[in-house]
Amino acid sequence: MENHEHHHTFQEQELSLEEQEINSWKRKLVWAWIFTIPLAFLMFSGRIFGIELFDEKIMTIIILILGFPVIFVFGFDTIKSGLRGFYTFYFNMDSLIALGTIIAYISGFLNLFDFVQDYSGISAMIMAIFITGKFIESKARGHASQEIKKLLELGAKKARIIKGNQEIEIDISEVKIGDILIIKPGEKIPTDGIVMKGASAVDESMVTGESLPVEKKVKSPVIGATINQDGILYIKATKIGKDTFLAHIIQLVEEAQGTKVPIQKLADKITSVFVPVILAITILSLLNWWFFTGDISRSLGVAIAVLVIACPCALGLATPIALMVGSGIGAKKGILIRKGEAIQTMKDIKTIVFDKTGTITKGSPEVRNIYSKVKEVYLLEVAASLEKLSEHPLSKAIVAKANLKKYKQVKDFKILRGRGLEGKIGDKRIVIGNTSLMSERKISLKDFESKIEEFENFGYTAICVAERNKIIGVIGVADAVKEDSIEAMASLNKQGYKTIMLTGDNEKTARAIAKEVGINEVIANVLPEDKARKIEELQKSGFVAFIGDGINDAPALKQANVGIAMGTGTDIAIEAGDIVLARGSLVGVVSAINLSKATFKKIKQNLFWAFAYNVIAIPLAIAGLLHPIIAEIAMALSSITVVTNANLLRRKRI
Amino acid sequence: MKKLKLLIQGMHCASCASNVEKSLKTVKGIKSASVSLLARKGTVEVDDSVNEEDLRKAVSKTGYKLVSIEEA
């Protein structure tokens, strides 16, 4: 509990830091330009309008006075942080700006004694542009994390609890496991729980990406932070604080921000030595220009341009900012990217392997077909009355299909393990089970044989129902394919992926399901412990992604180049999988692949621009072809471009 | 051996994050350190000999501020 509160403040602190930063840049920006605009006007008035307002020396003094607060007051943090590098040897971007502006400012003083050209006006402008650039960048960075921020703010703040006969509103942190909470229509469900009373539709789109409202009745699990739509729900809190579904999602998304994408490695190496290298290049350029031209003013201009144009930010931000936007977009849709590396690996995936039960199929059997010599209603009534007394999944499927209000009374009920059930309804002896039970009881399958074979070819389990030693019907039960699996598979096949189903089931059942969803290949009869080895074999012919439900598939998820774990609605298997889908739908796999590819493309674009910028701009500055102000504008634009480009990822349809 | 999350104030460029990371790695008892500029966060794996003050110093040495520490 305490831990949760601490966690919360950690995140709150983080959000407030961002706000502080943006506000601080904004304040500096306004003040810096209040001084810089008149300064620039004075500086250019002579050159542009041909008006000499003051004597040149007086002009220099005025500019030095106007420029002082811009550089040393509003730019104080930058100057301080930059100069610190010169005695700690931890150089950063500020070191370049600080050195550039201070050298330029000092040139104004030297100019008074006719030593060099006056760059002091330029100095203030560089600082003002730098501050402006940082302000725009910090805003854009805030924008980049908007989805993640929304996630942090999604949790309910209050809960209404039932104490005795009274409803009391309490703070969310006071809710304890086992508390009964009441949620009225339109209200937010405070925490994860289970419905005790009432029925309603709940909008879960904010945490699972599921766009349709989900029906809830007694015993249905509900997710905290989702919105109750039209009925009153009484729920019992089952998870609180950092154990909730939402808290897990937030944790996954946050952790992903800290992971690295391999393509960024080179850029990171460069940024770590960038500033000292630029300092060295600056000194060399200065000496070189001085030596060959003898023009100290020109040499200083070149040195200032080199100092201020070089910026490691675009390089350093290229990947993380795109990863942040990408994972935010994903989180909104219930696609949780856990490892940045998966984004890069995804583009090389050739084969996608699916677990069957619970991934392609719902994981629980359903009645798929009925063949009967009597009325279907009667057959189901008889069957369900017996099946009701068993806990077997196949029994549950039949009971669910019959959906009876009242069951017939059954006497002498017996479960025949692995074969079926028997009992008496009135004076009629009923036997329900597989064909071997029928032959054991010497019940003829005449007239039903071809139907049973047909069911088995579809991969159904054929359950025979016999009354008074005579078969009256066959019920075909099978694990049903999730409604959207077919759509997802069609899309993956169209994109040219080789799709394979990996299952412990027998060949016949597996093939039937594969045919239904449109999967290319089947590997059946695989023991759970052999799944990872099969993936390894498939990896010999290219990168493999594995999609599984995360609980028993962990080794295969780890073995695959990209492991995508399916959340089962209210539970998330955090440990398995590089990508986790909050909702157990295969459509999420298609989205996850598209999102990864789109994000990686952005990363590549960003890195290209960042490298291109530095490779072109720095030599131009060394060659003396860039005015220091143009250099500073280019520098500010380089990092803004990278952040803005990442934000454009939102335009992409995933 | 434990994992800590650090919230760091003042980093505003790529070399800032890389500096903090380098500085943290020089602290005795730190097994690994990784700093994210965007998340304003550092993750360190430390053994029990490392105390909060060591981490605070390592961060402030590079010119930034360690705002808070949380066990991950």
Image: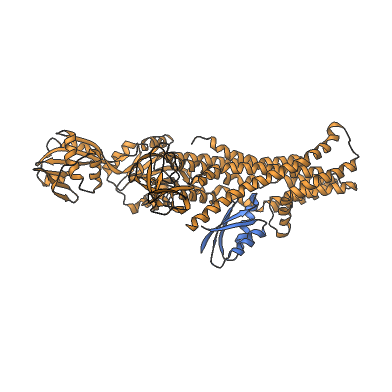
Chain colours: A orange, B blue
Q: Is residue A120 left or right of residue A178?
A: right
Quarter of the view holding residue A455: top left
Can residue A191 be seen here? Answer: no
Residue farthest to the front? A165
Q: Is residue A315 visible?
A: yes
* Residue drawn at the location 15% of the way across and 44% of the way down: A409
Between residues B24 and A374, which one lies in front from this camera angle? Answer: A374
Residue in view at x 23 percent, y 42 percent: A399
The residue located at (53%, 65%) in the rendering is B47
Q: Position of residue A192 (x, y in %)?
A: 41, 48
Classify residue A496 as left or right of residue A16: left
Image coordinates for residue A97, horizontal then vertical, percent: 73, 48
Q: Height in image: A34 above or below A7?
A: above
Q: Residue at x 64, y 43 (%)?
A: A137
Q: Position of residue A42 (x, y in %)?
A: 83, 38
Which percent across, then down, holds residue A414? 15, 50
